[in-house]
Image (spheres, rainbow, N blue to C red):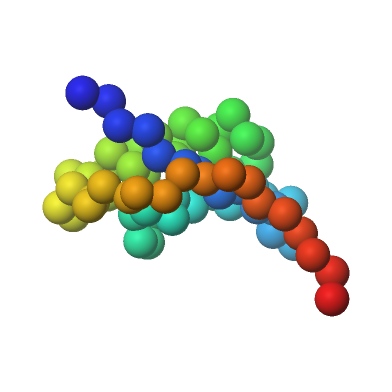
Amino acid sequence: MNETYTVVIERDEDGYYVGSVPALPGCHTQAKSIDQLMERMEEAIALWLEVEKAPEPNPLELVGIQRLAV
């Protein structure tokens, strides 16, 4: 059974894409391209699940992310 995880992608000051999985604390990686990042995220998630116990189901559904300047 495959699970689906939300990956949050940001770009750092050096131009690297940084991905993290909010449902899996500490599960993150980086890469120079989004394609490479997603390959690495798949590996990071698999390793996280191998080391940690399976996460509790998250009842929340990601609707979107917005930026707000204050």
Name the residue at the front extreme: 59
Q: Percent x, y for residue 11?
A: 69, 53
Relative vertical location of residue 14 with respect to residue 3 in this rendering, above or below: below
Q: Nearer the viewer, residue 25 or 67?
A: 67
Residue at horizontal 37 percent and vertical 53 percent from the top: 23
Relative vertical location of residue 63 with respect to residue 24 in this rendering, above or below: above
Q: In this image, 9 relative to 5: left or right? A: right
Q: Percent x, y for residue 24?
A: 34, 54
Residue at horizontal 84 percent and vertical 69 percent from the top: 69
Q: Nearer the viewer, residue 50 or 15?
A: 50
Which quadrant would the C terminus be assigned to in this image?
A: bottom right
Name the residue at the bottom extreme: 70
Residue at horizontal 56 percent and vertical 33 percent from the top: 36
Q: Quadrant of residue 45?
A: top left
Residue at horizontal 36 percent and vertical 37 percent from the top: 43
Name the residue at the right extreme: 69
Relative vertical location of residue 36 with respect to residue 30 in this rendering, above or below: above
Q: Percent x, y for residue 4?
A: 37, 33
Whether residue 28 is visible, yes or no, is no
Q: Percent x, y for residue 12?
A: 69, 59
Whether residue 5 is visible, yes or no, is yes
Q: In this image, 36 relative to 61: left or right? A: right
Which quadrant would the N terminus be assigned to in this image?
A: top left
